[in-house]
Amino acid sequence: MLIFPAIDIRGGKCVRLLKGDFAQETVFSDDPAAMARKWQQQGARFLHLVDLDGALAGKSQNLATVKAILAAVTIPVELGGGIRTMENVDEVLALGVRRVILGSVAVRNPELVKAACAKYGDRVVGRH
């Protein structure tokens, strides 16, 4: 079994929302890169990141934090949350993110998913 530890990012911090409610947030760490290192040290073979600010804004908002995480670990990282254009897909993958997750946009704009898959193959995950 392959387990993907998740780091939800909001305002550059590791958070967890209660039932998806942005008004009910618990901050677990001010240093997502340190949390990523901790998961890697505990044996994680892949990390799942969610840009919660990006999900609200419709475009990645925490790429500086994602860059810090990528610099802190050697394991592959996937990112979801607000990635809704090919330009944003290109930008995220150019950082070194292994896979982008296209969630709600997969339902709203399946042509984007098809185009991203044609360009990047298994570096794109459609999810809903």
Image (spheres, rainbow, N blue to C red):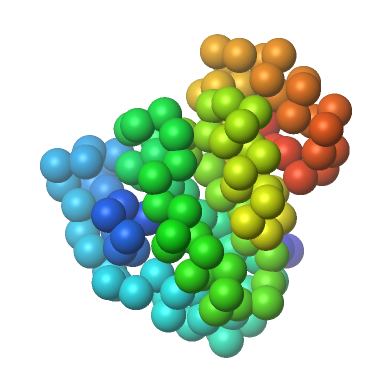
- Picture coordinates of residue 3, whole percent (x, y): 63, 63
Q: Is 107 located above or below residue 88 in the figure? A: above
Q: Is 29 located above or below residue 119 in the figure? A: below
Q: Residue at x 83, y 33 (%)?
A: 119
Quadrant in which the N terminus appears: bottom right
Q: Residue at x 77, y 21 (%)?
A: 114
Q: Residue at x 81, y 39 (%)?
A: 120
Q: Is residue 117 left or right of residue 15?
A: right
Q: Is 5 located above or below residue 91 in the figure? A: below
Quadrant in which the C terminus appears: top right
How many numbered circles are shown?
0
Camera sees residue 39: no
- Picture coordinates of residue 28, whole percent (x, y): 27, 69
| Quadrant in which residue 122 is drawn | top right
Q: Is residue 38 left or right of residue 18?
A: right
- Picture coordinates of residue 98, whole percent (x, y): 71, 55
Q: Is residue 57 left or right of residue 115?
A: left
Q: Nearer the viewer, residue 113 or 43?
A: 113
Camera sees residue 47: yes
Q: Nearer the viewer, residue 92 or 24?
A: 92
Q: Is residue 64 left or right of residue 107?
A: left
Q: Nearer the viewer, residue 92 or 38?
A: 92
The residue at the far left in this view is: 23
- Picture coordinates of residue 7, whole percent (x, y): 44, 60
Q: Residue at x 67, y 77 (%)?
A: 74
